Amino acid sequence: MTGDTHDHGHDHGDRPVLTYADDSVHDRNETGHFELLTDALKELSIEKGLVTATEVREYVDFFDSRGTEKGAEIIAKAWTDPAYKDRLLADGTAAAAELDIPMAGAELVVVENTDSVHNVIVCTLCSCYPRTILGLPPDWYKSKSYRSRTVNEPRAVLTEFGTELPDGVALRVHDSNADMRYLVLPKRPAGTEDWPEERLRELVTRDSMIGVAPARDPA
Amino acid sequence: MTGAALDPPGYAAGDAVRVTLTWPPGHRRIPQYIRGKAGVIERYCGSFRNPEELAYGFDGLPERHLYRVRFRQAEVWDGYDGHPEDTIDLEIQEHWLSPAEGGA
């Protein structure tokens, strides 16, 4: 969309027009205002006794050390245990808890890729992401470009990730804009029918669980 | 889900709904691109503290019902040229929804 100068027969009313410049500071690697604000907030929170410096450090350590292992564990189990897959699709939060994987207050929704449907996750408002099971999001997930284009030209975005959907496959975009967190259940790669769960985990990549790519090809 | 909402949920999966077309100031978690658009309730997600109040230091109570609403991409974007069944799902609080024609 190009602001309010286009002509396609609908009324934007008094809709405020956002431009990239409005908050492009998020996309630049500058130190400055927000870093100072973060430091000030942290120091004040410690000073007021809301948190301790140790708690802040432990929190950062936890998330920095978290990878995609928990997500891969969930997916490989769903591939090998149909009853678990059913529970996972019905209530992701409860199914993750079965594996002692916490969601830290958010609810998990798992969406399944099939021969006729492909799913991709985006958060247009910020960078909501299932951090307790996938770790910190990649930089591109937080970029203005991914966040805006994945909703209005998702097929072009997937193509840029090297993912061409076959004809007849519908694409479902999920904007993670509120209290749910999303995990894509990729298709189990062909040729892995005899594989045990532990080995299958190695095929489950971060990108496949966001939905920008299929699971790793075992060949 | 940490407490009760005031009323039972007003919508169920399959109901046709429309997102209110309005541009109030303040912290809103309903993206601009979906305002005014019609879709179908995909599922009820539960009730959650209202982010529009939480953002300003209030307690966000009573909780608001939250739904995942599925929209057809061709109805959201002018000139969308993907598969006709391509969809986009968002989470919308009940106070942003009103009944629409159609549904499943």
Image (cartoon, coloured by chain):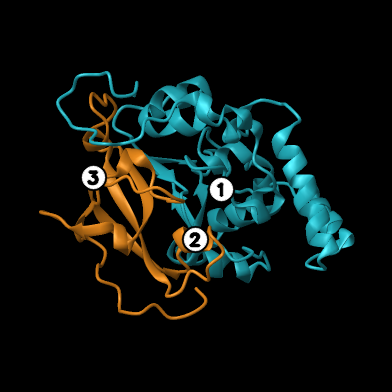
Chain colours: A cyan, B orange
Q: Chain of mark 1?
A: A
Q: Is residue B28 left or right of residue B41?
A: right
Residue in front for this viewpoint, A132 or B51: B51
What is the secondary structure assignment of the residue under circle 3?
loop
Sequence order check, earlier mark of 2 and 1? 2
Q: Which mark is residue A128?
A: 1
Disc 2: which residue: A85
Residue A38 seen anywhere in this rendered image of the structure = yes
Residue in front for this viewpoint, B32 or A82: B32
Tell me where residue A96 appears, x and y as whole percent: 60, 64
Decide: few, some or many residues near mark 3? Use Cα within 10 Å; few <14, some 14-19, many ≥20.
some
Of discs 1 and 3, which sits in the foreground? 3
Q: Which mark is residue B36?
A: 3
- Give the residue furthest to the left: B101
What is the secondary structure assignment of the residue under circle 2?
helix
Res A126 quadrant in image: top right
Spatial CA distance of label 2 from label 3 is: 36 Å
- Type of amino acid under label 1: Cys
What is the secondary structure assignment of the residue under circle 1?
loop
Q: Is residue B2 left or right of residue B16?
A: right
User: Which residue is pictured at 67% across the width and 64% down the height?
Assistant: A101
Residue A196 seen anywhere in this rendered image of the structure = no
Of discs 2 and 1, which sits in the foreground? 1
Whether residue A199 is situated above or below residue A169 in the rendered picture: below
User: Which residue is pictured at 23% across the width and 54% down the height?
Assistant: B40
